[in-house]
Image: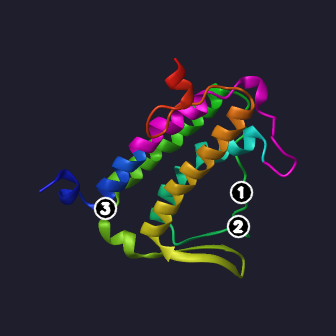
Amino acid sequence: MSEIQTMSVLELLSKELEAEAQTTRQMLSRIPDDQYDWRPHERSMDIRTLATHIAELPSWIGMTLNTSELDFASNPYAPEVINSTQELLACFEKHLADAREQLAKAEEEQLHDNWTLRNGDQIYMTSSKYEVLRMSMSQIIHHRAQLGVFLRLLNVPIPGSYGPSADEMDS
């Protein structure tokens, strides 16, 4: 029997979180301090907004496990104010540490409970907590890829995600 076959869903999620955290940390660490206000297009987020969102996404793990919903009408999003890569990495590590702790103390049964994302009476989604946790990790990957495009446009070498990047192949 393989290691994967003997792991619980929570253990698998923890393992995935750790793997994605390594790549995310590398990508976040590449942001030049003088580029936080840069955006590739008027409809795009600036790097500060995008990177802060990535750094805060691990906090969704604890929020999902410990609540039944997020209602933006009563809990508007107020991102942390990040002005440097050092602050960004500290923010990411803080939320990552909490995510690890929350997964470690969670119970498998919680994953079946429903969780709702809403804005007052408008329901955006209701899914199992497992599905929300997976979506949260997918959001980290998705937005990390966006950040990679931003950095590429700024001629910042990109770290590999699931193997070496073109920049790493050249070195």
Across and down, in percent, residue 103 comes to: 37, 54
Question: In this figure, which residue is indicated by the disc labeled 3?
Answer: 9
- Residue at image coords 84%, 52%: 43
Disc 2, SS: loop
Of 126 and 171, nearer the camera is: 171
142 shown above or below 123: above
Does 78 sit left or right of 16 as displayed?
A: right
Across and down, in percent, residue 107 comes to: 31, 64
Q: Which dot marks residue 104? A: none
Q: Are marks 2 and 1 in contact (CB under 8 Å)?
A: yes
Of 125 and 169, nearer the camera is: 169
- Residue at image coords 63%, 38%: 148
Across and down, in percent, residue 27 comes to: 57, 34
Disc 3, SS: helix
Q: Which dot marks residue 72? A: 2
Q: Residue furthest top?
A: 171
Three-letter residue code for mark 2: Phe
Please give the range of residues in magenta: 18-44
| Quarter of the figure with residue 33 | top right
Please name which of the two marks, 3 or 1, marks the residue nearer to the observer: 3
Three-letter residue code for mark 3: Val
Question: In this figure, which residue is indicated by the disc labeled 1?
Answer: 77
Colour scheme in the image? rainbow
Question: Upstream in the sequence, badge 3 or badge 1?
Answer: 3
